[in-house]
Image: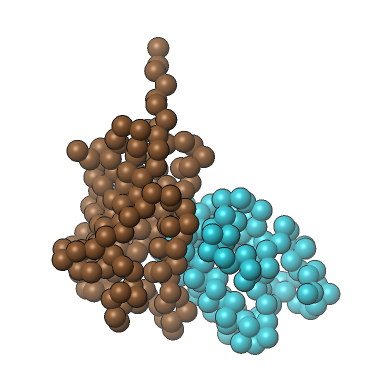
Amino acid sequence: MATVELRFSAQPEHVRTARLVAAAVARRAGVDEAVLDEVRLAVGEACSRAVGLHRSHGIDAPVHVVLTEEEKLFSIEVGDEVPGSGGGASAVPGVRASGADDGDDGAEDEMGLAVISGLVDDVEVTSGESGGVIRMSWPTTPATVLP
Amino acid sequence: MDLSLSTRNMSGPGGDRTVVEVGGEIDVYTAPKLREQLVELVNDGSYHLVVDMEGVDFLDSTGLGVLVGGLKRVRAHEGSLRLVCNQERILKIFRITGLTKVFPIHGSVDEAVNATD
């Protein structure tokens, strides 16, 4: 069962909230302090990408984030509802990063995935009929027992 | 924390430089403000920019995209875009994306303003 689940409307201003919540839950789950910056960045990238995909496809549904504390593992799943989006923008003809005024950052979407794969050792990107999911996980250290 | 931006002009051996001091978080929400600022500077004829990122708490790929866009714009006018950054967590993002080879990254604003290579 998910430890914390978030659904937010596909608006850029909510990505920060998702980052903060993910980092807070990761910290509580026992993810090393030194890795929390990576968690924050990776979840932000995944959410920004999902927001961009929803907006460019005119999808009103919310972006879905599932944070799960497992034994020795903390996992995050960021799901979008764009069919076939998991392979990156290049897999979906005509998809571009939203808000690109003159194509400056058309490759942003792929750069986001590049950052995620550069940061996270355990990452899996899948896509299906109902949308794409980026699943990432980090090891946790056992919580110290408080007196 | 929102994005803060301020600009000032400095003179170096290579001529005038516009220093853009950025603070806060550069992400999918705030990056458009930085893009607007860079576009405005170039449109106003400032082609040699120094982006001071010492006050930046967070940077993601959207922010990188805006910086690359800024570089493209100044290069179209034979200008330059130099970064000032000493924060390891920010530098790491430039490294994993290979952008350390694209941007000259300096340890201080003075060093960036005085660079002529």
Q: Quadrant of residue A64?
A: bottom left
Q: Position of residue B81 (x, y in %)?
A: 65, 73
Q: Position of residue A147 (x, y in %)?
A: 40, 12
Q: Which is more toward the observer, A56 or A1?
A: A1
The structure residue drawn at horizontal position 29% and vertical position 35%, both measured from the top left corner, is A70
The structure residue drawn at horizontal position 73% and vertical position 58%, both measured from the top left corner, is B108
Chain with cyan colouring? B
Toward the top, the furthest residue is: A147
Toward the left, the furthest residue is: A129
Q: Which is more toward the observer, B62 or A72?
A: A72
Q: Is residue B38 above or below residue B60?
A: below
Q: Is residue B43 above or below residue A38?
A: below
Q: Is residue A29 above or below residue B60?
A: above
Quadrant into which the C terminus of chain B falls: bottom right
Q: Which is more toward the observer, A19 or A138?
A: A138
Residue A127 seen in the current view: yes
Q: Position of residue A135 (x, y in %)?
A: 31, 52
Q: Position of residue A146 (x, y in %)?
A: 40, 16
**Is B20 on the left or on the right of A69, as rendered?**
right
**Is A54 on the left or on the right of B47, as rendered?**
left
Toward the right, the furthest residue is: B13
The structure residue drawn at horizontal position 53% and vertical position 77%, both measured from the top left corner, is B69
| Chain A colour as displayed | brown
Residue B51 seen in the current view: no
Q: Quadrant of residue B98?
A: bottom right
The structure residue drawn at horizontal position 47% and vertical position 53%, both measured from the top left corner, is A119
Q: Which is more toward the observer, A49 or A88?
A: A88
